[in-house]
Amino acid sequence: SKQPSELRVVFLHEYNAKISAWVRAHDEGREALAKVFPDKVYISSYEDVNPEVDAEQVLEEVAHNNADVVFTTSVRMYNACLKVAAQHPKTRILNCSLNAPHPLVRTYYPRTYEVTYLLGMLAGIMTKTGHIGYVAANPVYGVPAAINAFAQGLKSVRPAGRIRLRWACQTDAAHPLDFADCPEIDMVYARDSREPADTNRDYGLCRKLPDGSLQPLGLPIWRWDTFYVEIVRSIFDGSWDNAATTRAVNYWWGLRSGAEDLEYQETLPSGTRQLLDLLETLQGSDNVHIFPEKLYDN
């Protein structure tokens, strides 16, 4: 097919940039896309799109108005994407998730487990008690792998370390997400996509101080600019169409692709930082096996 000279690109978000660190991060990716292709992409963005109520209608409208590419940044929009993609095969619709991709809807997501492995290792090095709290958003594709990788990283430097897992999607007064009921926990890993801008809750790994406040140690950065720029570039250069249209495609990129990064607290011990940087380099060249190669029966 003929390579396009310009593209109409649309973003759909479940929340808005004021309350959601997740949407703000995708917005930065959108801005990067506009800078790389200033005269070739025409971008519009929709916020506060309810996945169950509005998503299908909004998708239908943008496809009807000849959008070339639609990025939906909520896993909960996946079903709406499938329905509309079937009616509008010329519109390239993508969903930010690890859902099983479909020939009509491509998915994209970072290899979060590569980063959580390193943060688990950092937690194991920095903890004094060996007790870590972990808040996961919800049990969707990719989240269990990220939790398990964090545990593997912790065990690599602190074999007796213990993790207490809580889910942000289940509120329970007796088991708060700040682990106030667990004085032994001195490290917390927490991410949720709906946190106000002035909190550390989307900060990743934090040290829990005696007064209950959190001191950030390591922040996972998902480089949405890499995804958006490279996916759109593939449409311009024709390689999007080389992936046979009968095949499901998932852009599942990690450290090696520059699709994720880590930001550490500046005061980390230099030896710790060197170790983490070395492990990151080894991961990028496939020389670290986060998950056991062999499975054993106990």
Image: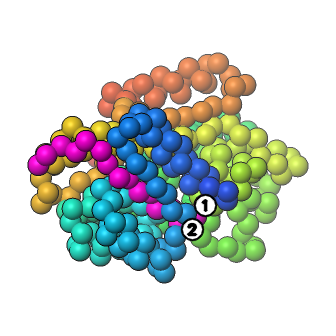
List the residue tagged with mark 2: 48
Residue 16 shows which numbered tag? Answer: 1
Q: Is residue 65 left or right of residue 205?
A: left
Please indicate whether residue 12 sits to the left or right of residue 295 in the image.
Answer: right
Q: Measured from the top left, where is residue 106 in percent x and y?
A: 28, 57
Q: Amino acid at mark 2?
A: Asp
Question: What is the span of residues highlighted in magenta in the rendered image?
Answer: 1-16
Residue 11 lies in the magenta-colored region: yes
Residue nearest the observer in this picture, 196 or 6: 6
Distance CA(mark 2)–CA(mark 1):
6 Å
In magenta segment, residue 236: no
| Furthest residue in direction bottom, as rendered | 53
64 vs 16, left or right, is left
Query: Do the numbered discs 2 and 1 sit on residues whose CB atoms are within 8 Å?
Result: yes
The answer, for residue 129, to whether it is visible in the render is no
Query: Along the line of sight, which residue is nearer the eye, 250 or 214?
Result: 250
In percent of width and height, residue 251 lies at 31, 48
Residue at the image point whose x is 67% and y is 73% from the top: 171
Give the residue displayed 43% in from the left and 40% down from the top.
33
Looking at marks 2 and 1 on the same chain, the residue that comes earlier in the sequence is marked by: 1
55, above or below 239, in the image? below
- Residue at 74 percent across and 59 percent down: it is 179
Residue at screen point 61% across, 24% down: 272
Q: Amino acid at mark 1?
A: Asn
Graded by Cα atoms within 10 Å as few (under 14), some (14 to 19) or many (20 or more), the crowding at tag 1 reads some
In depth, the one of 2 and 191 nearer the eye is: 2
Q: Nearer the viewer, residue 287 or 130?
A: 287
